[in-house]
Image (tube, rainbow, N blue to C red):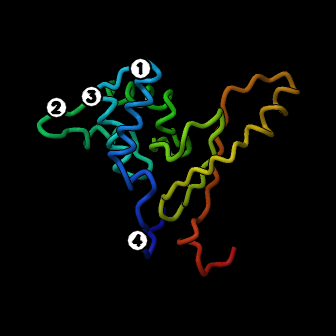
Amino acid sequence: MPACPHVHGSTAARRDVAAAMEAAERRCAVAGERWTPSRRRTYELLLQAGSPVKAYDLISSYAHDGEPVAKPPTIYRALEFLTAQGLVHRIESMNAFLACGSNPHGRSTEFLICDCCGRVEELGVGMDGAAFPAASARGFRPSRMVMEVHGACVDCSSGQPN
C-alpha cells in the first residue's frame, strides 16, 4: 500500500468502544452465548484498532494487565465466535478482521477498501437482494456473499482524476 500524505480520523467503531462492548455482551446474553474473557479481549482489540487486523497481529496486542499472551488457537476460536455472532467481519482479500460497524445484517456484506490508506468502510446495502435470487434460479443455494471493492477513499482521491 502506498503511503498517504494525510492523516485519517478515527472510525465509527472506535468512537465508543465501551458502548460497543456492552452491546456485544447483551447480544451474546440474549443469544444464550458465553461472553468469555478471550472473546471480550479479542473484540476490544478489534474495536480499538478501528481498522482491519490480522489474527497474528492480535496475538502481540493481547497481553493486558499482566495477562499471558494468547496462543493462536485462542485467537482463532474467538474470531470464529465473534464472526458467527455478527460482531466481526473477515476482510477476505486482506486476510484480516474488522469489528462490525453496523447493526445485525443479513447474509451479505459489502466493503469499500482504500488501497492507499487501508481504510475499510462497510456499506450495508444488502446486495444479496439481487444476487441470491439469481443464484437460486440457477439451482445454486447461496449461504453468504462478501463483496469487496478496492480503490481510493474520498480523502486519498481528492484532487485526483478517476
* Extreme-left residue of the structure: 66
Q: Residue furthest right?
A: 137
* Residue 7 image offset from top left, x and y in percent: 40, 71
Side (left or right) of 95 relative to 133 = left
Label 4: which residue? 7
Instruction: Give the Cα distance between marks 1 and 4.
Output: 39 Å
Kind of residue sitting beneath label 1: Glu
Looking at the rendered structure, the secondary structure element under dot 3 is helix
Marks 4 and 2: CB-CB under 8 Å?
no
Find numbered disc 1 in the image and state the secondary structure of the residue it sits on.
loop
Dot 4 crowding, Cα within 10 Å, few <14, some 14–19, many 20+: few
Q: Is residue 7 above or below residue 45?
A: below
Q: Disc 1 or disc 4, which is closer to the eye?
A: 1
Mark 4 or mark 3, earlier in chain: 4
- What amino acid is at disc 4? Val
User: Which numbered marker is on residue 68?
Assistant: 2
- Secondary structure category for the residue under label 2: loop
**In the image, what residue occupies the spot 56% across and 45% down?**
93
Q: Amino acid at mark 3?
A: Pro
78, 2: nearer the viewer: 78
| Mark positioned earlier in the residue sequence (1 or 2) | 1
Residue mark closest to the camera, 1 vs 2: 1
Residue bearing the label numbered 3: 37
Q: Residues within 10 Å of mark 2 (few under 14, many from 20)?
A: few
- Furthest residue to the top? 32
